[in-house]
Image (cartoon, rainbow, N blue to C red):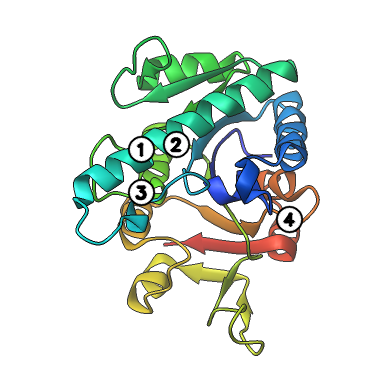
Amino acid sequence: MFKRVVIKLSGEALAGNNIAGRFDDKIIAGIIAQIRQLLDNDVQVSLVVGGGNFWRGRDSKDGMDKVKSDQIGMMATVMNAVYLTDMLEAGGIESLVMTPVIIGTVTQQFSKKAALSLMAKKNVIIFAAGTGHPFFSTDTIAAIRAAELEACALLFAKNVDGVYDADPRQNNKAVKKHHITYDEIIQNNLTVIDTAASAICREQRLLSIVFGLDEPGAIVKCASGDDEKIYEIGTKVTV
């Protein structure tokens, strides 16, 4: 098992097919059960959550200020993070939302020292509001936090089971890659991880795993560090 992981969850993953309701509690309960299993195995866990079930910066309407659109997206991630803390604590797991800036009494400002101390006590830290600046995705803040916390791996939960040489939803001949480098992702413009996040991971020599969240036990399999289990449900991304 890895000692410390950062898990990137999209807002869409939290909603499942229940977009109108914004949250699919069955999916979230499954995620929490896996997080509990990791904590029981002394894996330190933090999450970065997206906001796509409410709003994404790229969803802005014509003529809308891009900065304001991204700010709405940041607030959407905070709403998701607060909901996750409630679900985690209902399951007996202590948790806390950290953001780049304090949002009243709702969140705590990010501190590497505080985050590591809490994670060592089996608290789950949820990072929200992105970097606090526009033009950066939640993939990017996931890479930054993973580097800052010296995580063993950054786990990208997706709606496809890894990286393919083409979009498998549009091309039934797309081939899944068990292993790929950040250079290949950047050079081939593969959008599975955004370019800025890929560049940070490459520079910091971070291990990433892109995997399908729908696979039973996928998070635990990724955190095991076992290549066979990882290749079964995802793709390893390295320098």
**SS label for mark 1:** helix
Looking at the image, residue 87 lies above or below residue 234: above
**SS label for mark 2:** helix
Instruction: Identify which residue, 94 or 177, lies in the foreground.
Output: 94
The Cα–Cα distance between marks 1 and 3, rounded to whole angstroms, is: 13 Å
Label drawn at residue 74: 1
- Closer to the eye: label 3 or 4: 4
Which residue is under mark 4?
A: 214
Label drawn at residue 77: 2
**Of marks 2 and 3, which one's residue comes earlier in the chain?**
2
Residue at x 59%, y 30% (from the top left corner): 45
Relative side of 14 to 114, left or right: right
Q: Look at label 1 and name its amino acid.
A: Met
Q: Look at label 4 and name its amino acid.
A: Asp
Q: x and y percent of residue 171 in the render? A: 60, 87
In the rendered image, the quadrant that contains the C terminus is bottom left
Looking at the image, residue 133 lies above or below residue 19: above
**Of marks 1 and 3, which one's residue comes earlier in the chain?**
1
The Cα–Cα distance between marks 2 and 4, rounded to whole angstroms, is: 21 Å
**Of marks 4 and 1, which one's residue comes earlier in the chain?**
1
Badge 1 vs badge 3, beta-carbon distance below 8 Å: no
Toward the bottom, the furthest residue is: 173
